[in-house]
Image (cartoon, rainbow, N blue to C red):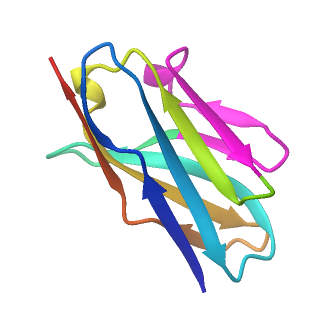
Amino acid sequence: QVQLMESGGGLVQAGGSLTLSCAASGSIFSIFVMGWYRQAPGNGREFVAQITTGYSTNYTDSVKGRFTISIDNAKNTVYLQMNSLKPGDTAVYSCYLNTTTGRAYWGKGTLVTVSS
């Protein structure tokens, strides 16, 4: 069993910064990619960013240049540094992990609220 625990969410003013963390624990054998999705109130889930254990990254266009994803393979932890936050970034941010065998795991999410 794999558990993902997010932290770092909160309330921030527009233009501010937050760093989210997601630590994976449990029976982890072969992580391939870790990343983040978000879901704003009334909206569907939206891909934000992902990173492979080989440090290849991918971002949705709306966060490019503002968000940076990184991974600590030794700690099985992924980070999302969010700068220049906008009210439109307000959402529940959930991390995920995909293994090399195709299994997917999700965290419960952490709320990010950006006030104008």
Assign the C terminus to one quadrant of the image. top left
The quarter of the image holding the N terminus is bottom right
Q: Is residue 63 above or below residue 79?
A: above
The magenta stretch spans which residues?
A: 49-72
Query: How many badges with numbers are in the image?
Result: 0
Between residues 86 and 56, which one lies in front from this camera angle?
86
Instruction: Give the side of residue 25 with respect to residue 55, left or right.
Output: left
Q: Position of residue 66 (x, y in %)?
A: 49, 17
Q: Is residue 90 left or right of residue 48?
A: left
Q: Tell whether 82 sits left or right of 92.
A: right
Farthest residue, direction bottom: 1
- In this rendering, is residue 32 above or below 9? below
Provide residue 95's location: percent of width, then percent of height: 49, 55
Image position, residue 28 (x, y; %): 73, 76
Residue at 61% x, 62% y is 97
x and y, in percent, of residue 34 in the image: 64, 53
Q: Please say whether residue 25 is one of the residues in the magenta stretch.
A: no
**Rendered residue at 63%/73% (across/down):** 25
Observer-nearest of 67 and 11: 11
Q: Is residue 51 magenta?
A: yes
Please identify the quarter of the rendering in which residue 108 is found.
bottom left
Instruction: State the residue at coordinates (73%, 59%).
Output: 75
Q: Residue furthest right?
A: 54
